[in-house]
């Protein structure tokens, strides 16, 4: 299996609840290398641009308001099969449906307040990484 990179966010709900350290610990325990990381308070415009793929969906306004409501931690993670591995580490979007031991099951409180985001495909990862990080930050 090839080494790849994926994009991850520790969302505002988790940052506000003081869960950043716990989630970073789980990232390390799962065997990821953190290639780039920064704290970011997204503007509403940045959130709308990042989630533009969902613009026609009914939850778009609520999602972008939530993602611009406080600080997040944005990261580039690297490992073998990073995209699938991070999605497995996070668990299902709905914490009630996530597998035991996953971040969302253990720490999430609702579909919106599920603590984390992760890219779902290589093309998405490339867009999301480039949205927050320039090339010189990824060496």
Image (cartoon, rainbow, N blue to C red):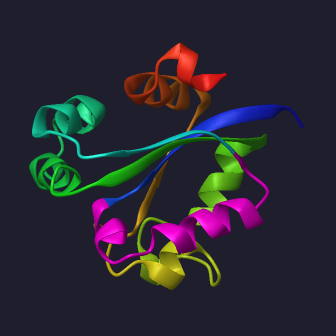
Left or right position of 102 against 42:
right
Residue situated furthest right in the rendering? 1
Residue 3 seen:
yes
Q: Quadrant of the C terminus?
A: top right
In this figure, what is the number of numbered marks?
A: 0
Q: Residue at x 29, y 33 (%)?
A: 50
Q: Residue at x 38, y 69 (%)?
A: 114
Q: Report the span colored magenta.
A: 12-33
Query: Quick check: is 127 in the magenta stretch?
Result: no
Q: Nearer the viewer, residue 107 or 123?
A: 107
Residue situated furthest top in the rendering? 135
Q: Nearer the viewer, residue 103 or 97?
A: 103
Give residue 76's quadrant in the image: top right
**Residue 89 in the image: above or below residue 58:** below
Magenta span: chief secondary structure? helix
x then y, percent, for residue 24: 59, 63
Query: Quick check: is 17 in the magenta stretch?
Result: yes
Residue 91 seen:
no
Q: Quadrant of the N terminus?
A: top right
**Residue 11 in the image: above or below residue 135:** below
Left or right position of 94 against 22:
left
Q: Residue at x 16, y 36 (%)?
A: 56
**Residue 44 in the image: above or below residue 109:** above
Q: Residue at x 60, y 55 (%)?
A: 87
Left or right position of 77 against 42:
right
**Residue 4 in the image: above or below residue 107:** above
x then y, percent, for residue 138: 60, 24
Left or right position of 78 against 117:
right
x then y, percent, for residue 4: 74, 32
């Amino acid at each position: 299996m090839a080494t790849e990179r994926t994009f991850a966010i520790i969302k505002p709900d988790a940052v506000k609840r003081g869960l950043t350290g716990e989630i970073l610990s789980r990232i390390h325990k799962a065997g990821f290398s953190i290639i780039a990381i920064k704290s970011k308070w997204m503007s509403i415009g940045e959130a709308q641009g990042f989630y533009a793929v969902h613009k026609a969906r009914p939850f778009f306004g609520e999602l972008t308001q939530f993602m611009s409501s406080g600080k997040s931690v944005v990261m580039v993670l690297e490992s073998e099969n990073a995209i699938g591995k991070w999605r497995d580490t996070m668990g299902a979007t709905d914490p009630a449906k996530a597998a035991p031991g996953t971040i969302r099951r253990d720490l999430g409180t609702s579909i919106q307040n599920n603590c984390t985001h992760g890219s779902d495909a290589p093309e998405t990862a490339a867009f999301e990484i480039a949205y927050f990080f320039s090339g010189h930050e990824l060496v």
